[in-house]
Image (cartoon, grey):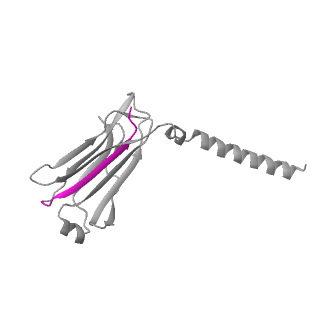
Amino acid sequence: MSMNSLIKTLSIAAFITIVILLIVSCDSSTESTCGTKQTADTTLILKASGPTNFSLVTPDARKDCHAEFELLFGWADPVKRETNQFKPSLDWTFQTYPGFFFFPAAPAVLWEQEDGYWWHAEVSEGAKNQDDEYVQYQIVGTLGSTNDEIMIKASIKYVPY
């Protein structure tokens, strides 16, 4: 075997070894053992006269399994929601309870649905480095400066502890 052939063979073997190590060390191996996810969800309307904020909290959840946070919000008035593409004023975070990782405002994108325009934000995150044995995942939102009513649809898919 020539030196060039040997180097080529060793390079291919090293590449395959690195790929295998990356696959084995990936967090997805933990995800596959997580089990069935449950969903905590809520639908509500925020308005200046109250309520002006909301909090969706899961029961105790496995911290080593990613939770899937999803927030959908739009104008509560269906006519305004069908015609107005401006984003309603809402501040929100995706976090653990009482708070370890913290996503100040995952970017929201405009979704055109059959019932009008909605803004959508989502994050998939776990909390394996948190000291507690389990976590509670949470979505918190506060109405911004508006007199209009905003409809909120929030959900968290999580693996129970």
Identify the residue at horizontal 31%, vertical 38% (top origin). 58
As for residue 66 lying within the magenta part, the answer is no
Identify the residue at horizontal 21%, vertical 57% (top origin). 151
Position of residue 98 in the picture relative to residue 150 (left or right): right
Residue 101: x %, y % from top left: 36, 40
Residue 131, picture quadrant: top left
Identify the residue at horizontal 19%, vertical 55% (top origin). 144
Position of residue 6 in the picture relative to residue 45 (left or right): right
Secondary structure of the magenta portion, mostly?
strand
Residue 107: x %, y % from top left: 35, 56
Residue 47: x %, y % from top left: 14, 54
Q: Which residues are magenta?
A: 147-161
As for residue 149 lying within the magenta part, the answer is yes
Residue 95: x %, y % from top left: 33, 42
Q: Residue furthest right?
A: 1
Please name whichever residue, 20 or 2, is drawn nearer the observer in this view of the structure.
20
Position of residue 2 in the picture relative to residue 129 (left or right): right
